[in-house]
Amino acid sequence: MTSKNHKPSEGIAFTGLIIAAFLWGLSYPLTKYVEDCPTFYIISIRFAAAAVALGLVFRKKFRLFNFETLKCGFLLSFVLTSMFIFNIIGIRYTTSVRASFFTCISFLIVPVLNAVMYRVKISRIIGISAMICLAGMFLLCYAPGMGGVSLNAGDILCIIASVAGSLHILFVERVAKNDNVDSTLFTVFLLAFISLWGTIIGLFTGDFSYSAATPTHLGLIILMGLLCSAAAFTLQSNFEAVVPSNRVGVIFSLEPASGCILSVLFLKEAMSWTSWLGALIIMFSIFYMEWAS
């Protein structure tokens, strides 16, 4: 049995989750650099690199192995892989702007699912923070060509992807609080299973017939694995036991905001004034949530 008596303070956990959100945001410009590579080719290599690196660094953790840890990693890998699949298919049937918006509304879905599944009440502070965040997300993703308010098939698939991401946040919180599951070892299995499913799907879709990958492509995919997967998911699985999932959902809304800002820095992409304002509002919603709590 793994001891989880020595929990970090909520301030340290909050900071760790902020870093995780920024690391996931880093995947936006890195993915842009390797966009010519097939999707499941990237997923397979990215998560394999993450699982191997994490397994080597924390190899002593394998002494804590039990089937409950393996089971949790196995089951949650389907949730995350589903998120990737629905997002990948959804973006084909809608605009990238709309896909970005609908895929990143977990901060709204998490409290609703929490209320339905676990009867966790939505506090006034979380509700206000989520509404502020929604306004920021709309401005961040707003573009003249994003279309009307009606939903198309791609939008619905991206919303399903967001639901899968929200379920992952909720389930990771329960895993992180389970004394029989070591959070780091759970993350190793989670990442390994995602790589396995990506490899299987990639073999069926022909993604591994791709032969134009350069050493730079492979290096960047591995870098994504180390930073955006191994480090980010380890931070999430270890710190969600301290920060309630409703707050985590709002914190993770920093992912698209940081992704846009990092794309400006690394790719020299332009952000409109509405996007900058949206990013600032999202950050304000998180500061408000922490200040008012």
Image (tube, rainbow, N blue to C red):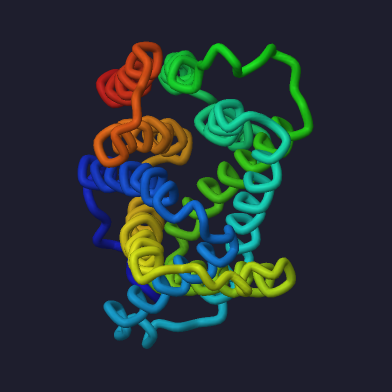
The residue at 55%/12% (across/down) is: 144
Rendered location of residue 106, percent (x, y): 54, 34
Rendered location of residue 150, percent (x, y): 75, 16
Quadrant where the N terminus is found in the figure = bottom left
Can you tell which quarter of the image residue 28 is in? top left
Rendered location of residue 293, percent (x, y): 31, 24
Q: Is residue 157 above or below residue 23?
A: above
Query: Is any part of residue 240 visible from this angle?
Result: no
Q: Foreground residue, 283 or 148?
A: 148
Rendered location of residue 181, percent (x, y): 45, 70
Q: Is residue 75 above or below residue 192?
A: above
The residue at 27%/45% (across/down) is: 19
Q: Foreground residue, 21 or 213?
A: 213
The residue at 54%/46% (across/down) is: 170
Q: Foreground residue, 78 or 113?
A: 78
- State the count of labels: 0
The residue at 40%/69% (across/down) is: 214
Residue 117 shown left or right of residue 292 in the figure: right
Residue 49 shown left or right of residue 288 in the figure: right
Residue reaching furthest right? 153
Query: Is any part of residue 126 visible from this angle?
Result: yes
